[in-house]
Image: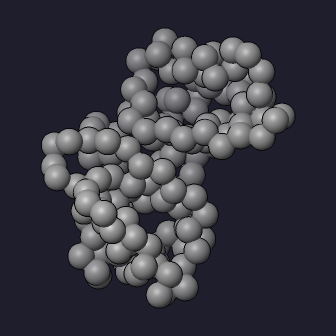
Amino acid sequence: MPIKQVSVFLENKTGRLWKALNILKSNDIDIRALSIADTSEFGILRMIVSNPKNAKEALESENFAVSLADVLAIEVEDQPGGLEAALNILNSNDINVEYIYAFVEKKTQKALVVLRTEENERTLKILQDNGFSLLGQDEAYTL
C-alpha cells in the first residue's frame, strides 16, 4: 500500500517555494507532510498532499518540474527508539533507505514516518510481517 508523494524541482531563488505552495493553496490542495533537500543551486520539495494527481497537474501548468513517486507511510512508537526499531529491521534485511521524513498527527499515540527504499514492495511486506502499521492513501491524504 504505497502512497503517492509529489516531488517538485525548485530553483534556489527567492519566491519559488512560495509560488509552489501558493499554487497548491489556489487549487485547494492540503499539504500533509513535506521535506526539502537543497543545494546552493536547487532543491527538491517532497510532499504528501491531499490530492497528488491534481497537485502535479496544477504545478506543471505553472512550469514546475514535478514527479510522483511511491513511498511508504508507517506508524512507529512515539518514544525513543521507535524509528530505530523499524530501521533495524530494514537494516537486518539489507534494505537501503533512500530518504525519510516524519510528520505529526496526534489522533494516535504513534509517530508517522514517510520513507522510500529501493524495494518498496519488499519493505512493505517486511514491515507488516514485523507488526508495523502502514497507512494507505485514504488515511495519509486525509490526516
Residue 127 screen position, x and y as percent: 35, 75
Residue nearest the observer in this picture, 10 or 139 = 10
In which quadrant of the rendered view does residue 118 lie?
Answer: bottom right
- View extreme (left): residue: 108
The vertical placement of 50 against 46, above or below, is above
Q: Can the viewer see residue 40?
A: yes
Residue nearest the observer in this picture, 122 or 115 = 115
Q: Which residue is drawn at 39% across and 26% down?
A: 30
The vertical placement of 32 against 133, above or below, is above
Left or right: residue 53 versus residue 15 is: left
Q: Can the viewer see residue 71?
A: no
Residue 40 screen position, x and y as percent: 81, 35
Position of the C terminus, as image quadrant, is: top left
- View extreme (right): residue: 41
Residue nearest the observer in this picture, 46 or 58 = 46
Left or right: residue 69 versus residue 110 is: right
